[in-house]
Amino acid sequence: MADQDIEQAVARALEDAPPRNFRETIDLAINLRDLDLNDPSNRVDESVVLPSGTGQDTRIVVFAEGETAVRAETVADEVLSNDDLEDLGDDQDAAKDLADNTDFFIAEASMMPRIGASLGQVLGPRGKMPTPLQPDEDVVENVNRMKNTVQVRSRDRRTFHALVGTEEMSAEDIADNIDTILRRLYGDLEKGPLNIDSVYVKTTMGPAVEVA
């Protein structure tokens, strides 16, 4: 259960947001300090499973063959075979469109070398190389977990953002998501909480409210 201060900050952000004619997302703005982000080892790059989900659809594409492909078709948005992979490798525009319109990729581990050779130049810079699926892993379970996953990535910027929900979710659920992300950061950053200067929560178009 999230800290009451976090939940109160979320509630205030939701209350202060003026009505819009579209569904707003809830974003967390994180400001880092005392880190040399020119050194890639200091950058934040995490996939975090949100306990309350993202509140919106997450598009997932699976590269698979055989029985894994059949099972993936029940849960994934699209399943691509080795033949599809070869076609994408010959069509950079189609590969870029796929990458830009997909949140996460999963691939059978055996297909990863071909994906790296064919699509690495497209997926790599976008931070969207597939998560390898090992032979003993359940593709359905992996896809369902990834639907509740967000990327928390700073790159070389001291201020970066992460999706923590939508305005239709309760303040408590959004606060639980924020708490999960902050705990992950505290554990991963060199000096833990001391490397975080400030944290704000806001709706897409609403005012920012300080969390920490």
Image (cartoon, grey):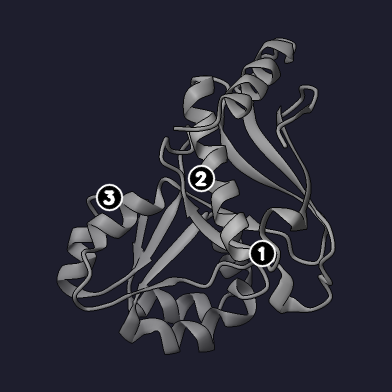
Q: Residues within 10 Å of mark 2 (few under 14, many from 20)?
A: some
Q: Amino acid at mark 2?
A: Thr
Q: Residue at x 24, y 56 (%)?
A: 140
Near-viewer residue (163 or 143): 163
Q: CA distance from mark 3 to mark 2?
A: 25 Å
82 with respect to 25 (left or right): left
**Mark closer to the observer (3, 2):** 2
How far from the left and from the top, in percent, is residue 112? 41, 83
* Image quadrant containing the N terminus: top left
Near-viewer residue (91 or 194): 194
Q: Residue at x 61, y 56 (%)?
A: 185
Residue placed furthest toward the left:
67
The tag on residue 189 is 1
Q: Is residue 76 visible?
A: no
Q: Residue at x 84, y 72 (%)?
A: 36
**Mark closer to the observer (1, 3):** 1
Label located before the other in sequence (3 or 2): 3
Which quarter of the figure has residue 139?
A: bottom left
42 with respect to 149 (left or right): right
How far from the left and from the top, in percent, is residue 20? 70, 14
Q: Amino acid at mark 3?
A: Val
- Disc 2 target residue: 180
- Disc 3 target residue: 75
When the figure is inspected, residue 157 is found, relative to residue 181, above or below; the finding is below
Q: Residue at x 65, y 67 (%)?
A: 126
Q: Is residue 1 visible?
A: yes
- Marks 3 & 2, CB-CB < 8 Å contact: no
Q: Amino acid at mark 1?
A: Leu
Q: Secondary structure at mark 3?
A: loop
